[in-house]
Amino acid sequence: RKPILRYLDQKLLNPGIIALMEKNNIEAAVPLVHLGSLVGIYFLSMKKNGRPFLISELNVLAELDEWAGTAVYNTWVISEKEDYSRSLELEVEQQSRELDRVVDETRKFQRSRQAYSKQRESILDQVRRDLRKPIKTITDLMQDLPLRKEMSDPQVKALTAAVDLLSNRLD
C-alpha cells in the first residue's frame, strides 16, 4: 500500500499520468482506495519548503488512502442518489402535470356532456309537448263511433295499438 511515486515507481504509471505530473510539477500520486477498488488519485505537488517528501510522510498518506477513498466514494454515492432523487422529482412533477391536464379535460368533457344532456332533454320535452295535442286528437277521434264503423276490427285494433304505443313512448 505504498503511494505511487513519480520518482520511485514511475514504471507503474500510465504515460499520460507521468506527463500530467511533469507538466504540473506533481511530486507524488497517492491512490484513493475503497474496498480494494481505485476510486481516485490524490496528486501532491512539491512541498512549500521545496524539499522532497520523506518516505515517512508518504507512508502516512498511504495509510489514509482507504479513509480518503471511502470519503470520495461516499461523496460520489450521495451525488448519484441526489441526481436520481432530482430525476424522480422531475418525473413526478411531469406526471402530475399530465394528470392535471387529463383531469381538466375530463371535467370539460363532463360539463359539455351535461350541457348536451340538458339541451337534449329540453328538445325532447318540446317534442313531447308538441306531439301530445295531435295524439289526443287522434285518441278522441278513435272514440268517434262513425269513424269506427267505417273501419274493420283489425284496422281499429292496429290504429289503437299504434296510438297507445306512441302515447306510451312520449310518456
Image: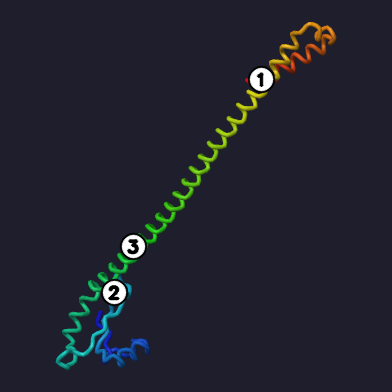
**Residue pointed to by mark 1:** 132
At label 2, the amino acid type is: Val
* Cβ atoms under marks 3 and 1 closer than 8 Å: no
Q: In which quarter of the image is residue 148?
A: top right
Q: Quadrant of residue 76?
A: bottom left
Residue drawn where x is 72% and y is 17% of the image:
163
* Cβ atoms under marks 3 and 2 closer than 8 Å: no
Q: Distance between the residues labelled 3 and 2?
A: 21 Å
Mark 3 neighbour density, 10 Å: few (under 14) some (14–19) many (20 or more): few
Indicate the secondary structure of the residue bearing disc 3: helix
**From the image, which quarter does the C terminus lie in?**
top right
**Residue pointed to by mark 3:** 81
> Which sits in the foreground, 104 or 31?
104
Residue drawn where x is 16% and y is 93% of the image:
51
For residue 14, above or below residue 115: below
For residue 9, above or below residue 141: below
Which of the two labelled residues, at mark 2 and mark 1, occupies the earlier sequence position? 2
> Which sits in the foreground, 44 or 86?
86
Which of the two labelled residues, at mark 3 and mark 1, occupies the earlier sequence position? 3
Indicate the secondary structure of the residue bearing disc 1: helix
**Residue pointed to by mark 2:** 33
Image coords of residue 5 (percent x, y): 26, 87
Q: How far apart are marks 2 and 1 (CA)?
A: 95 Å
Which of the two labelled residues, at mark 3 and mark 2, occupies the earlier sequence position? 2
